[in-house]
Amino acid sequence: MWTRHRRIDFSDVDYPGTLFRADAANFRIPPTPRQIKYIIIHITGGPAQDEGPAINTFRHGPASAHYIVNRQGHVTQFVRDAHIANHVDNINSATNRDSIGIEHVNQWSHGIHMRPTHRQYEASARLVAWLCQRYNIPIVHDTRRHAPGIRGHIEEQPHSGHTACPNPAWDWHSYISLVQNIQVPNLDAFIASLARDPFPME
Ligand SMILES: [Zn+2]
Protein backbone atom coordinates (compact mmCIF):
# COMPACT_ATOMS: atom_id res chain seq x y z
CA MET A 1 0.00 0.00 0.00
CA TRP A 2 1.28 3.45 -0.80
CA THR A 3 -0.08 6.83 0.02
CA ARG A 4 -0.64 9.24 -2.80
CA HIS A 5 2.07 11.83 -2.96
CA ARG A 6 0.99 15.30 -2.06
CA ARG A 7 -0.32 17.94 -4.43
CA ILE A 8 2.34 20.12 -5.76
CA ASP A 9 3.95 23.22 -4.33
CA PHE A 10 5.40 24.95 -7.38
CA SER A 11 8.15 26.58 -5.33
CA ASP A 12 9.44 23.10 -4.59
CA VAL A 13 9.82 21.76 -8.14
CA ASP A 14 11.94 22.56 -11.16
CA TYR A 15 10.01 21.35 -14.21
CA PRO A 16 6.77 23.34 -14.55
CA GLY A 17 4.94 20.31 -15.99
CA THR A 18 5.43 18.40 -12.74
CA LEU A 19 2.09 17.24 -11.33
CA PHE A 20 3.21 15.66 -8.07
CA ARG A 21 6.07 15.94 -5.64
CA ALA A 22 7.45 13.18 -3.45
CA ASP A 23 10.63 13.02 -1.41
CA ALA A 24 13.45 10.56 -1.93
CA ALA A 25 15.41 9.38 1.09
CA ASN A 26 18.75 9.24 -0.66
CA PHE A 27 20.10 12.25 -2.52
CA ARG A 28 23.15 14.45 -2.18
CA ILE A 29 23.56 18.21 -2.23
CA PRO A 30 26.75 18.99 -4.15
CA PRO A 31 29.29 21.19 -2.33
CA THR A 32 29.37 23.53 -5.34
CA PRO A 33 26.68 23.97 -8.02
CA ARG A 34 26.83 21.07 -10.44
CA GLN A 35 26.77 21.15 -14.21
CA ILE A 36 24.11 18.86 -15.63
CA LYS A 37 25.58 17.29 -18.78
CA TYR A 38 23.28 14.44 -19.74
CA ILE A 39 20.01 12.67 -19.09
CA ILE A 40 19.64 9.00 -18.19
CA ILE A 41 16.42 7.20 -19.16
CA HIS A 42 15.19 4.32 -16.98
CA ILE A 43 12.21 1.99 -16.89
CA THR A 44 10.96 0.53 -13.63
CA GLY A 45 10.63 -3.07 -14.87
CA GLY A 46 8.67 -5.33 -12.52
CA PRO A 47 4.93 -5.94 -12.63
CA ALA A 48 3.78 -2.51 -11.38
CA GLN A 49 1.44 -0.47 -13.54
CA ASP A 50 1.65 2.71 -11.53
CA GLU A 51 4.36 4.68 -9.78
CA GLY A 52 3.45 3.46 -6.28
CA PRO A 53 6.19 0.87 -5.82
CA ALA A 54 8.82 3.24 -7.19
CA ILE A 55 7.63 5.97 -4.82
CA ASN A 56 7.88 3.60 -1.89
CA THR A 57 11.31 2.43 -2.99
CA PHE A 58 12.62 5.96 -3.38
CA ARG A 59 11.15 7.02 -0.05
CA HIS A 60 13.26 4.40 1.66
CA GLY A 61 16.37 4.42 -0.54
CA PRO A 62 19.06 3.73 -1.46
CA ALA A 63 17.77 4.14 -5.04
CA SER A 64 16.31 7.45 -6.20
CA ALA A 65 15.72 9.46 -9.38
CA HIS A 66 14.83 13.04 -10.18
CA TYR A 67 11.57 12.28 -11.96
CA ILE A 68 9.18 9.46 -12.72
CA VAL A 69 6.70 9.48 -15.61
CA ASN A 70 3.71 7.19 -15.17
CA ARG A 71 1.74 5.44 -17.91
CA GLN A 72 -0.81 8.29 -18.07
CA GLY A 73 1.97 10.80 -18.66
CA HIS A 74 1.91 12.33 -15.18
CA VAL A 75 5.26 13.56 -13.91
CA THR A 76 6.41 13.30 -10.28
CA GLN A 77 9.57 15.01 -9.05
CA PHE A 78 11.56 13.36 -6.24
CA VAL A 79 14.90 15.14 -6.22
CA ARG A 80 15.61 18.74 -7.20
CA ASP A 81 17.62 19.17 -10.40
CA ALA A 82 20.45 20.87 -8.51
CA HIS A 83 20.81 17.85 -6.24
CA ILE A 84 22.31 14.45 -6.99
CA ALA A 85 20.04 11.40 -7.14
CA ASN A 86 21.15 7.77 -6.90
CA HIS A 87 19.95 6.23 -10.16
CA VAL A 88 23.18 4.77 -11.62
CA ASP A 89 25.74 2.77 -9.64
CA ASN A 90 26.04 4.61 -6.32
CA ILE A 91 25.34 8.04 -4.88
CA ASN A 92 28.95 9.14 -5.43
CA SER A 93 29.25 7.94 -9.04
CA ALA A 94 30.41 10.33 -11.76
CA THR A 95 27.21 9.54 -13.67
CA ASN A 96 24.96 10.62 -10.84
CA ARG A 97 27.07 13.71 -10.28
CA ASP A 98 26.55 14.98 -13.84
CA SER A 99 23.10 13.73 -14.81
CA ILE A 100 19.36 13.86 -14.35
CA GLY A 101 17.66 10.46 -13.97
CA ILE A 102 14.15 9.86 -15.27
CA GLU A 103 12.16 6.71 -14.46
CA HIS A 104 9.23 5.49 -16.53
CA VAL A 105 6.64 3.02 -15.25
CA ASN A 106 6.95 0.09 -17.62
CA GLN A 107 6.76 -3.61 -17.02
CA TRP A 108 9.47 -5.69 -18.62
CA SER A 109 9.91 -9.01 -16.94
CA HIS A 110 9.37 -12.77 -17.19
CA GLY A 111 8.33 -12.79 -20.80
CA ILE A 112 6.01 -9.80 -20.40
CA HIS A 113 7.45 -7.25 -22.75
CA MET A 114 5.50 -4.05 -22.42
CA ARG A 115 6.19 -0.77 -24.17
CA PRO A 116 5.80 2.75 -22.81
CA THR A 117 2.50 4.43 -23.73
CA HIS A 118 2.23 7.33 -26.19
CA ARG A 119 1.24 9.65 -23.36
CA GLN A 120 4.27 8.55 -21.45
CA TYR A 121 6.60 9.16 -24.38
CA GLU A 122 5.02 12.56 -25.02
CA ALA A 123 5.20 13.65 -21.37
CA SER A 124 8.76 12.41 -21.09
CA ALA A 125 9.71 14.20 -24.32
CA ARG A 126 8.31 17.50 -22.99
CA LEU A 127 10.22 17.06 -19.75
CA VAL A 128 13.46 16.23 -21.55
CA ALA A 129 13.03 19.06 -24.09
CA TRP A 130 12.66 21.43 -21.19
CA LEU A 131 15.68 20.00 -19.34
CA CYS A 132 17.82 20.14 -22.50
CA GLN A 133 16.86 23.75 -23.09
CA ARG A 134 17.44 24.77 -19.49
CA TYR A 135 20.77 23.00 -19.01
CA ASN A 136 22.05 23.34 -22.57
CA ILE A 137 22.16 19.60 -23.25
CA PRO A 138 22.23 18.49 -26.91
CA ILE A 139 19.11 16.56 -27.98
CA VAL A 140 20.92 13.50 -29.27
CA HIS A 141 20.89 9.85 -28.33
CA ASP A 142 24.59 9.51 -27.59
CA THR A 143 25.38 6.08 -26.18
CA ARG A 144 28.93 6.96 -25.11
CA ARG A 145 29.33 7.01 -21.34
CA HIS A 146 29.48 10.52 -19.83
CA ALA A 147 28.92 12.20 -23.22
CA PRO A 148 26.54 15.17 -23.36
CA GLY A 149 23.10 14.07 -24.57
CA ILE A 150 20.46 11.50 -23.69
CA ARG A 151 21.02 7.78 -23.12
CA GLY A 152 19.67 4.72 -21.34
CA HIS A 153 20.85 3.30 -18.04
CA ILE A 154 22.18 0.17 -19.74
CA GLU A 155 24.17 2.31 -22.16
CA GLU A 156 25.73 4.38 -19.37
CA GLN A 157 26.43 1.33 -17.23
CA PRO A 158 26.64 -1.67 -19.58
CA HIS A 159 27.66 -4.15 -16.89
CA SER A 160 24.93 -3.39 -14.40
CA GLY A 161 22.24 -5.92 -13.62
CA HIS A 162 19.67 -3.63 -15.22
CA THR A 163 19.80 -5.41 -18.52
CA ALA A 164 16.45 -4.10 -19.82
CA CYS A 165 16.69 -0.52 -18.60
CA PRO A 166 15.30 0.84 -20.84
CA ASN A 167 16.40 -1.12 -23.91
CA PRO A 168 14.83 -2.98 -25.65
CA ALA A 169 11.51 -1.55 -24.37
CA TRP A 170 12.46 1.95 -25.46
CA ASP A 171 11.93 3.26 -29.00
CA TRP A 172 14.86 5.66 -29.19
CA HIS A 173 14.26 6.76 -32.77
CA SER A 174 10.70 8.03 -32.21
CA TYR A 175 11.54 9.35 -28.78
CA ILE A 176 14.42 11.55 -29.89
CA SER A 177 12.39 12.97 -32.76
CA LEU A 178 9.56 13.71 -30.32
CA VAL A 179 12.00 15.64 -28.11
CA GLN A 180 13.51 17.43 -31.11
CA ASN A 181 10.10 18.47 -32.41
CA ILE A 182 9.11 20.24 -29.20
CA GLN A 183 10.07 23.78 -30.07
CA VAL A 184 7.96 26.26 -28.22
CA PRO A 185 9.07 29.90 -27.97
CA ASN A 186 8.21 30.09 -24.29
CA LEU A 187 8.46 26.50 -23.19
CA ASP A 188 8.06 27.25 -19.48
CA ALA A 189 4.76 29.07 -19.93
CA PHE A 190 3.51 26.45 -22.36
CA ILE A 191 4.30 23.53 -20.09
CA ALA A 192 2.93 25.30 -17.03
CA SER A 193 -0.35 25.83 -18.88
CA LEU A 194 -0.46 22.14 -19.76
CA ALA A 195 0.15 21.20 -16.14
CA ARG A 196 -2.58 23.46 -14.84
CA ASP A 197 -5.08 22.14 -17.36
CA PRO A 198 -6.53 19.15 -15.56
CA PHE A 199 -6.81 16.32 -18.01
CA PRO A 200 -8.97 13.33 -17.25
CA MET A 201 -7.39 10.67 -15.08
CA GLU A 202 -7.41 7.30 -16.78
ZN1 LIG B 1 17.71 1.93 -14.62
Image (cartoon, rainbow, N blue to C red):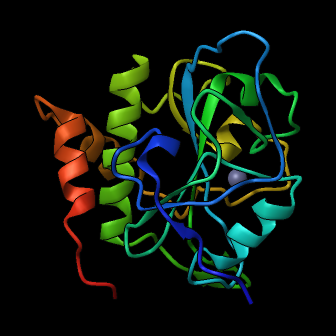
Which quadrant does the N terminus fall into? Answer: bottom right
> Compared to 4, does 140 lie above or below?
above
Q: Is residue 137 visible?
A: no
Residue 141 quadrant? top left
179 relative position to 152: left or right: left
Q: Quadrant of residue 162?
A: bottom right
| Residue 179 in view, yes or no | yes
Q: Residue at x 24, y 47 (%)?
A: 191
Task: Note whether 195 is above or below 133 in the view shown.
Answer: below
Taking the spot 65% from the left edge, 78% from the top edge, the residue there is: 52
- 15 or 178, nearer to the observer: 15
Decide: is 34 above or below 1. Answer: above
The residue closer to the viewer here, 183 or 29, is: 29
Q: Residue at x 66, y 66 (%)?
A: 44
Residue 93: give x, y in percent of width and height. 84, 27
Residue 157 position within the rendered picture, expressed as x and y whole percent measured from the top left? 76, 38
- Residue 27: percent from the left, percent from the top? 79, 40
